[in-house]
Image (cartoon, helix red, strand yellow):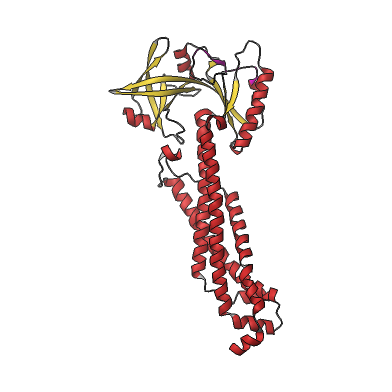
Amino acid sequence: MDASFFIAGRLRFKGNIAMICIAVSFLVMIIAVSVSSGFRHAIRSGLSDISGDIRITPPTLSVLDESLPIEADAAYRPYIEEVEGVSEIRPVVYKAGIVKSGDNIQGVLFKGMENDDTVSLAVSVPKRLAEIAGLKTGDRMLTYFVGESVKARQFTVTSVYDALVEADDKLVVYADISDLQRVNGWNASEVSCLEILLEDDMRNESDIESANDRIGTLINAYSSDDEESVIASSSVSSYPQLFDWLSLIDFNVLLILILMTIVAGFNMISGLLIMLFENISTIGLLKSLGMTDGAISKVFLSSSAILVAKGMLAGNALAILFCIIQDTTKVLRLNPENYFVSFVPVKMDFGMILTADILAFVLIMLLLLIPCLFISKVDPADTVRVR
């Protein structure tokens, strides 16, 4: 066994306060990383549910103009399906409507998609609309559609959903695509837009924009002459404020990681200095026995590393416990008007957590090289006299 590690195992590092500080620092860092990952996952997944990652629409970008439908099975669609990262292409019909329930009148946006619901005129309403209009599962929902003429439909509420992301003020009601096609007087191949969903690992700004450019090129290359002109637009361009906000969160998390690492490092520096002063005679004795400054430094760095590792493991354990509790109970709530989601989302990305742990541990150990310079100043003759 290395003599430095042997001696380090027998030194008592009275650094409980330093270890607690290390644990708290790692607790904050891991929670920050998990919450940041949670926000990214929740908002990007929520945007995909709302409007897809990429949307193919008429050139006006309007999905509510019933005079401008596009083809669901356009000539370019098979080529888009082959684009790397594309997981699904879904035809969608949008329709603005007015919901009347008792004395309550509320404007909503209907989104028609293909589903397996066997109930005629079935809809899924957002929790906020259910609270406003006093709706619950099984209720009938009278809706008016205003266009060239006013059309009324009596829908049945089959479910109430809690929107993961509230990106705007629209209350989105999900319906069967065929019901809205009949309201618009369209055939089965006419839709408002095509929404393209990407794989989870491609839901970042650069990959979304790259896929959007590729899809736009394919549309121009393979559209047939008898098809209506369309364009591709990404969720990044549709919701720039959300992606800017995510970038700001990532910057804040990076700042937290740096600050917590520095705080933990300087607490360990003070703890190690105290340990060095308490063992000054031991340092002198080891020098008199022929041990080099580097070997003596290894003794105290090894003892410090054990303490840092204990604090890191304790902080990680507490952070993971917090994340499990929050993910299960969603006890910490948020105002969706300010944070776009109604609760603090957490996602334990163990790759990022491990990276943060390793980088923080290495940086703390590098900072601990500073107090080790004190060892070279110790004169064995002086320490022997003091002893």
State the extent of the magenta-drawn residues as a range: 66-76
The x and y percentages for residue 352 are 59, 50
Q: Is residue 248 depicted above or below 196 in this figure?
A: below
Residue 30 position (above or below residue 275): above
Left or right of 67 in this view: 382: right
Depicted 378 relative to depicted 128: above or below: below
Horizontal and vertical percent position of residue 302: 62, 70
In screen coordinates, is 187 left or right of 150?
right
Asked where in the image residue 54 lies, by quadrant, the reply is: top right
Q: Who's the residue at 49% across and 60% down the image?
A: 24
Is residue 211 inside the magenta stretch? no
Asked if one can make out residue 325 in the rendered structure from this viewpoint, the answer is: yes
Seen in the picture, residue 113 relative to 288 is either above or below; the reply is: above
Outermost left residue: 103
Q: Nearer the viewer, residue 123 or 352?
A: 352
- The answer to whether residue 2 is visible is no
Kindly give the residue lying farthest to the front in the view shown.
377
Q: Quadrant of residue 196?
A: top right
Residue that extends furthest to the bottom in the rendered view of this protein? 385
Q: Position of residue 332 (x, y in %)?
A: 41, 47
Quarter of the picture holding the C terminus: bottom right
Predominant SS of the magenta segment:
loop
